[in-house]
Image (cartoon, rainbow, N blue to C red):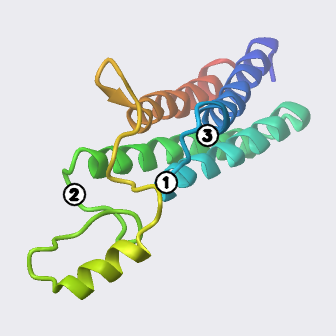
C-alpha cells in the first residue's frame, strides 16, 4: 500500500465516520429524529468505517472493497429513500402513509395510532432543494467510487 493510497483510505474512512457523526448531529443537536430508512442509511457507513480502518491497519485489499461496498450501499439506500420522499414510489408500510380512500374511520384511526412518530415519506430538512437522503445518496455513491479509484489507481 502506497502512502497516497493509505491517505486516501484514511480520508474515505473519515468520510463514513463524519456521515455518522453528522446524522447524530441532526438527531441530537438539531432535534430531528431519524426515520427507519435514515437508520438503514447509517448501518453501511458503520461497515465502511470499520472495514476502512482494517484496510488501513492491515493493508488487506478485501477490507477496502468492503468499505467501498458499505459506502455505496448507503448511497443506494439514500436513492431509495429519495424516491420515497419525492413520492416516486411507496416506501415500507411501517413508515409511510398509504391510500386511505377506502378505509373505514376505525381502520384509519388504528393506522394513525400505530404509525411511527417519524415518517419516511416526509422531508424534515432541505438545503438548495435537496434533502438529507439526497445528499447521502450523492456523497456516499461518490465515496464508493473514490474507494474503487483509490484501490485500483493509487497502488
Q: Earlier in the sequence, mark 2 or mark 3?
A: 3
Q: Is residue 99 above or below residue 12?
A: below
**68, 3: nearer the viewer:** 68
Q: How many marks are shown on the rendered structure?
A: 3
Which mark lies nearer to you, 2 or 3? 3
Q: Earlier in the sequence, mark 3 or mark 1?
A: 3
List x then y, in percent, for residue 82: 33, 43
Q: Which residue is mark 3?
A: 27
Q: Which residue is mark 2?
A: 89
Q: Residue at x 67, y 47 (%)?
A: 66
The answer to whether 111 appears left or right of 17 in the picture is: left
Q: Is residue 109 above or below residue 4?
A: below
Q: Which residue is mark 1?
A: 35
User: Farthest residue toward the right?
Assistant: 57
**105, 49: nearer the viewer:** 105
The answer to whether 29 appears left or right of 34 in the picture is: right
Q: Residue at x 75, y 36 (%)?
A: 52
Determine crowd level at label 1: few under 14, some 14-19, many 20+ residues with C-alpha closer than 10 A: some
List x then y, in percent, for residue 131: 38, 32
Quadrant of the drawing holding the C terminus: top right
**75, 65: nearer the viewer:** 75
The answer to whether 131 appears left or right of 102 in the picture is: right
List x then y, in percent, for residue 90: 25, 62
**64, 126: nearer the viewer:** 126
Quadrant of the drawing holding the N terminus: top right
Determine crowd level at label 2: few under 14, some 14-19, many 20+ residues with C-alpha closer than 10 A: few
Amino acid at each position: 500500500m502506497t502512502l497516497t493510497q493509505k491517505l486516501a483510505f484514511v480520508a474515505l474512512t473519515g468520510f463514513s465516520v463524519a456521515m455518522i457523526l453528522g446524522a447524530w448531529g441532526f438527531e441530537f443537536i438539531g432535534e430531528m429524529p431519524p426515520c427507519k430508512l435514515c437508520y438503514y442509511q447509517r448501518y453501511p457507513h458503520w461497515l465502511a468505517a470499520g472495514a476502512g480502518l482494517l484496510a488501513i491497519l492491515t493493508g488487506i485489499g478485501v477490507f477496502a472493497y468492503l468499505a467501498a461496498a458499505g459506502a455505496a450501499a448507503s448511497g443506494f439506500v439514500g436513492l431509495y429513500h429519495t424516491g420515497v420522499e419525492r413520492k416516486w414510489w411507496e416506501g415500507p408500510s411501517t413508515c409511510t402513509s398509504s391510500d386511505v380512500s377506502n378505509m373505514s374511520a376505525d381502520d384509519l384511526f388504528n393506522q394513525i395510532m400505530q404509525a411511527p412518530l417519524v415518517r419516511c415519506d416526509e422531508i424534515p430538512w432541505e438545503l438548495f432543494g435537496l434533502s438529507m437522503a439526497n445528499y447521502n445518496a450523492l456523497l456516499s455513491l461518490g465515496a464508493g467510487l473514490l474507494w474503487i479509484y483509490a484501490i485500483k489507481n493509487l497502488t
